[in-house]
Amino acid sequence: MNSSIKVRKESWALWLLFALPALIVYTAFMAFPVVNSMRLSFFTGSGYSLDNFVGFNNYVRLFTDPEVSARFFTAFKNNWIFFGIHMLVQNSLGLLFALILSGRGFRGKGIFRTIIFIPVTLSVLVTGYIWKLILNPQWGALNIVLTKIGLGSLAIPWLGDTRTALVAVALVSSWQWVGLPTMMFLAGLERIPEELFEAAQIDGAGGWLTFARVKLPLLLPVVGIVSVLTFVGNFNAFDVVFAMEGANGPPSYATDLMGTFFYRTGIAGQHPIGIPDMGLGAAVATVTFIVLFAGILLANRLTGRGAEDGGAREGA
Amino acid sequence: MVSYGRVRDPAKPLKYLLLGLWSLLVLFPLWTMVINSFKFKNDIYLDPFGLPKSLNLAGYLTVFRNSPFPRYFLNSLLVTVVSLAFILFFGSLAAYGCVRWKSRYSRWIYLFFVAGLTVPIKIGSVNLLQIMIKLHLLDTTWSVIPVYVAMGLPIAVFTLYEFIKGIPVELTEAALMDGAGPYKIYWSIIVRLVRPALATVAIFNLVPIWNDLWFPLIFIRKDDQRTLILGVTRLFGEYQTDWSKILAVLSLSCVPVILLYLTMAKQFIAGLTAGAVKG
């Protein structure tokens, strides 16, 4: 009794004091800059200071100025293709790996899991460089191997051709991140009660039917989370293109993504001039944010309350 | 149950084949990188996949003796350690405060932190750049630290809040009866009990901070202030044909992480998967 009275006596100011350091850093270096960057998308200025209010002018330029909008729409379109390849390759492979690994009596689960996850821990820049070396048309390992096994016709400059560059970069990125969906699907599959599989088996359901009728429906929330994560990650992607192709998204903007476009407009400056247009950059960032937000809302609508009750948090 | 165990899986060889091929695809690039870093240039071209015929340590020696990379490595170490320390300290303080302060204001503060889980901080880059200029932190290694701390706090508060909430009230009340103040309780009880959660939060943040390119790239230009990953971006401009050096640097920049990962694979997988969900 005595103690509970004592607890109540401790004033709110004390607990606020506990939260204060984190609150200050988080507000000053995350919450405020994010909101303020959106406000700055309505301004223009020279160099790093933005003090000239221009209304929606930056957005108008972004969508209608022939030069700027061409770059924007290319990057936007490329980013959707980039995302599509991740959904198709990375997430399908992740699901497949998880289904195999979760199989009863499957030996070597631990070692395969460890290997599949290795690239997730590595810097995107470093793996991007490694793959750039492997994909080098003259002496890269890939083309050496292809020529040796009689597929010499496939030994082409993967990163230098506008038709293959984006796919190549997206595949390398899928290679790097496939461990994440694998682990999320695996966690989801392991949460499915054993009895359900037994019941399905007694009813005579084979592997495919068990997957389609039992596993997949129960995995739907995880599919939602994985899709959202892939979407957010892909529309923020920058490093992999920067490492493998460069900040300009070559060849001829075939690998330009929202991330690289934002870097050039808002931070580094467009190619020949090199002076950043920070107001325009802020507009690009804001549009990216709106796209992300809309995507997350849509995904939540489609998969129920996917993002909240899904289980990938289990590791936490 | 028994019959289930006896079911033969005709697809088993196929499953092992698939996972085996994928493992090869993961390990082969890393293997090629490491072995070639020990080879002489001619051997790299002649036999890129075999073991080195004669050992060439020149790449590693130039990196250690005569390059800025040791400096970059120390910068990265400093950034990572200091950022993690602040994330854990501030994060656990805030989580404790939010748990113990029972009012709707503390709920709002908690939700304010958790909202940060869904917002990519890159969106704020334009303003962050201006802030760093104003604080005279631009072009210094220090500039990235407050950003990483801010970035790491939402997941820290979120994780530690749940954990601290699970601590039985009797434990802290007993200490209260013994006359311990709230700070003493935080230090001697809370921090001790949430240690496993602190380790998880550290792993969440360790890899993204160590591997980050974006913020060093936009904040730091001065050579001696670079982090390791930012330093790696210089490789292709300057040592265009010095393969043993390029490969040595690439190997050195990921081998420590791989070793750390292999010793604690389970924790890394759990931590990074959960950390990714913060998206």
Image (tube, coloured by chain):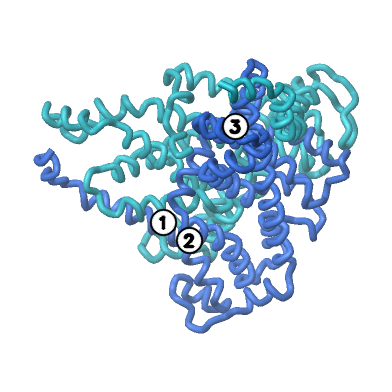
Chain colours: A cyan, B blue
Which mark is nearer the camera, 3 or 2?
3
Can I make out residue A67 in this image?
no
Q: Earlier in the sequence, mark 3 or mark 2?
A: 2
**Label 1 to label 2, Cα distance in Å?**
7 Å
What's under tag 1, amino acid-wise?
A: Leu
Q: Can you identify the residue that label 1 sits on?
A: B25
Label 3, residues with CA under 10 Å away: few <14, some 14-19, many ≥20: few
Label 1, residues with CA under 10 Å away: few <14, some 14-19, many ≥20: few
Q: Which mark is residue B177?
A: 3
**Label 1 to label 3, Cα distance in Å?**
60 Å
User: In the image, what residue occupies the spot 13% across and 38% down?
Assistant: B1
Q: Quadrant of residue B114?
A: top right
List x then y, in percent, for residue A168. 51, 47
User: In the image, what residue occupies the spot 45% across and 39% down?
Assistant: A315
Q: Is residue B194 left or right of residue B179?
A: left
Can I make out residue B43 in this image?
yes
- Asked if the residue at tag 2 contacts the one at tag 1, i.e. Cβ–Cβ closer than 8 Å, the answer is yes
Q: Is residue A118 left or right of residue B185?
A: left
Discs 1 and 2 carry the same chain letter: yes
Check disc 1 and report its element: helix, strand or loop: helix
Tell me: residue A99, above or below residue A199. Answer: below
Q: Earlier in the sequence, mark 1 or mark 3?
A: 1
- Asked if the residue at tag 3 contacts the one at tag 1, i.e. Cβ–Cβ closer than 8 Å, the answer is no
Q: Is residue A40 left or right of residue A100?
A: right
Q: Can you identify the residue that label 2 sits on?
A: B29
A96, B136: nearer the viewer: B136
List x then y, in percent, for residue B17. 28, 54
